[in-house]
Image (tube, grey):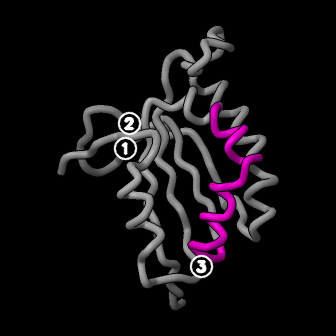
Amino acid sequence: MEVVNKVTPTPEQFEQFFSQGEDGPFIMVNLLKFRDRAEYRDGSYSDKTGADAYRHYADAVQKHIASVGAKSLTSGAVTGLMLGEVEELWDMVGLVEYPSLQAFQAMLTTPEYQEIAVHREAGLAGQLNIKVKPAKVSG
């Protein structure tokens, strides 16, 4: 399995993701890899680490998540790998539950979200976003 780490989706990926016929609640699994040093397009905050820049984004995005009826479930540093093999571990994993694709898209497209997204982009070397349909577990 080849994994291609990206920071932003292509226009085709964005359109395909939001044009799926399936809707309803989903959990977004965020696999995050940070830059050693934040890289802002305008060169500002060059003394920040990638993790620092992303932390700024993560703190600010909480109100945007809540504004569309979503909620952060958990996040944390990746500290080990029990099964399988990878060249390099992810730095962090975050789980966010959204009520719908429409809510997720609404959040991403607001000017207020776009203002804080610069910190996400500056901090990340790459990311995988994996959409998971919640299932009821018996027991």
**Left/right of residue 93 with respect to residue 10 in the rendered view:** right
> What is the quadrant of residue 37 in the picture?
top right
Q: Nearer the viewer, residue 84 or 11?
A: 11
Percent of width and height locating residue 3: 26, 45
Percent of width and height locating residue 83: 29, 51
Could you tell me which residue is drawn at 42 percent across and 77 percent down?
A: 20
Q: Label 3 vs label 2: CA separation?
A: 28 Å
Q: Which tag, 1 or 3, sits closer to the chain's start?
A: 3
The residue at which mark 3 appears reads as 25
- Furthest toward the top, the residue is 47
* Contact, mark 2 vs mark 1 (Cβ under 8 Å): yes
Q: Residues within 10 Å of mark 2 (few under 14, many from 20)?
A: some
The disc labelled 3 sits on which kind of residue? Pro
Principal secondary structure, stretch drawn in magenta = helix
The disc labelled 2 sits on which kind of residue? Leu
Residue 125, disc: none
Q: Which tag, 2 or 1, sits closer to the chain's start?
A: 1
The residue at which mark 2 appears reads as 89
Q: Which residues are magenta?
A: 99-118
The residue at which mark 1 appears reads as 81
Q: Relative to 96, is 83 above or below? A: above
Per the image, is 56 magenta? no
| Mark 1 element type | loop
Q: Label 2 vs label 1: CA separation?
A: 8 Å
**Left/right of residue 124 with respect to residue 55 in the rendered view:** left
Q: Nearer the viewer, residue 37 or 106?
A: 106
